Amino acid sequence: MNKKKVILNRVPHIILLYWIIKIASTTLGETGADMFSMTFNLGYGVTIVIFTVLFFISLFVKLAIKRYETISYWVLFTMTAIVGTAISDYIDRTLKLGYAMGSGLLLALLFVVLGVWYKTEKSINVEKITTNRAELFYWLAFLVANTLGTAAGDYLSDNLELGFMVSAAIIASVLVVTALCHYYTKISGVLLFWIAFVLTRPFGATFGDLLTKTHDKGGLGVGTIGSSIFFGIMLIYALFREIQVEKTKKINELAI
């Protein structure tokens, strides 16, 4: 008898814990990128090279596993957050294109990636990824979206001079509205996901800047090292909870 081939899903389901981990990861991406590029004086170029290499190594490992595994998934996700932050800062401060133009270019690039993804796979469902090709589109879209989110957050806080606290409050308000639309309207879940996905990035970026920047720059002066350690611990705890949830789910599935 031929055994039925089981096709495993490679990504997590989008539940509240996912968003908690994502915010911790993206905020760590902001503080971590600043820690390496500025506190450790590596510069944006070197930081991009280092974490791009780590991104591709993590991506190779994740593709080889061919299923969802908590640690490999979120390590790769955090790499996209750090690389995205460094690329966004490189676009603005090294290439001097500015956050407004950078945000526009990245938004257009995200639409292109999602369009090609949909045309190729006939779906951009972020909760059901079962092939290498679909997962490559998935991570490319995430990398662009994380870079876009960083640029958009910096545009609000710096270019519009709203400051880190006000920017974070505005983004948080829009995220609440997006969540309410998910539960109480018939607006496309895919559209609402990408709105929330992009916006949680500038929320993490502005909140991270609020913690790390000095008082004269509108921050709390905690510093990049202390903030990165804090969010690293928060991320590890959230991942531990995720692993426990996954174990409980598997036990329940076996019991059925």
Image (spheres, rainbow, N blue to C red):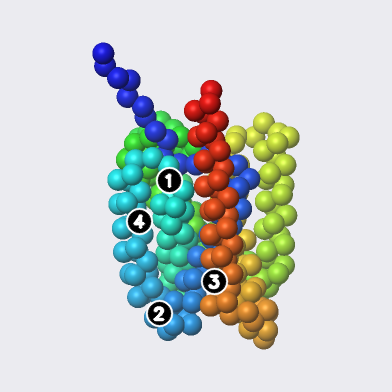
Cα–Cα span, label 4 and label 1? 12 Å
Q: Which residue is mark 1?
A: 69
Q: Residue at x 46, y 34 (%)?
A: 128
Instruction: Judge by depth and name the residue closer to the eye, 181 or 57.
Output: 57
Cα–Cα span, label 3 and label 4? 20 Å
Q: Which residue is mark 2?
A: 43
Q: Which residue is mark 3?
A: 228
Cα–Cα span, label 4 and label 2? 22 Å
Q: Which mark is residue 58?
A: 4
Q: Are marks 4 and 2 in contact (CB under 8 Å)?
A: no
Task: Label 1: state its secondary structure.
Answer: loop
Residue 210 screen position, x and y as percent:
65, 73
Residue 215 screen position, x and y as percent:
68, 84
Q: Residue at x 46, y 48 (%)?
A: 70
Q: Nearer the viewer, mark 4 or mark 1?
A: 1
Q: Are marks 3 and 4 in contact (CB under 8 Å)?
A: no
Q: Earlier in the sequence, mark 4 or mark 2?
A: 2
Under mark 4, the amino acid is: Ser
Q: Residue at x 49, y 71 (%)?
A: 32
Task: Label 3: state its secondary structure.
Answer: helix
Instruction: Judge by depth and name the residue closer to the eye, 187 or 22.
Output: 22
Task: Label 2: state its secondary structure.
Answer: helix
Residue 114 screen position, x and y as percent:
44, 43
Could you classify mark 3 by the number of other residues whose Cα lies within 10 Å: few (under 14), some (14-19), or many (20 or more)? Answer: many
Under mark 2, the amino acid is: Gly
